[in-house]
Amino acid sequence: MINEEDAGYCRSDSGSVPHERSWRCDCAAVIAPELEIWKSALLAGAVSVFKVVESLARASVDGTLTRDEIDAAFGASPAKIAKKKAAKKAAAR
């Protein structure tokens, strides 16, 4: 008989949930097994917001924020920013 862990299932308070690999189910369960999934998601979201706020704070040390600095804080790469500028120029012609 195959147990749930061998079959690719993760045990949680809400029952067994199928997934690809057991280590992907809830990595926080290794560190804090009593941490519920929704709490883990809430913490991940809060950390993401804090990273954006930190990036904006670092960029505004000189007292101004440019559009590029704001885009970079939200995860836009320099290539995406350049592509966006090129598209804006092309639309203005």
Image: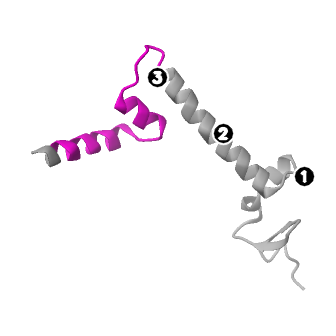
Q: Position of residue 18 (x, y in %)?
A: 75, 74
Quadrant, the N terminus = bottom right
Q: Quick check: 67 above or below 21?
A: above
Label ID, residue 59: 3
The amino acid at mark 3 is: Ala
At horizontal 48% and vertical 15% (from top left) the residue drawn is 61
Residue with the most extreme top position = 62
- The chief SS type of the magenta part is helix
Q: Quick check: 30 above or below 85?
A: below
The amino acid at mark 1 is: Glu
Q: Nearer the viewer, residue 33 or 14?
A: 14
Q: Badges 3 and 2: C-beta atoms under 8 Å apart?
A: no
Disc 2: which residue: 47
Is tag 3's residue or tag 1's residue first in the polypeptide sequence? 1
On the question of residue 27 being in view, the answer is no
Disc 1: which residue: 34
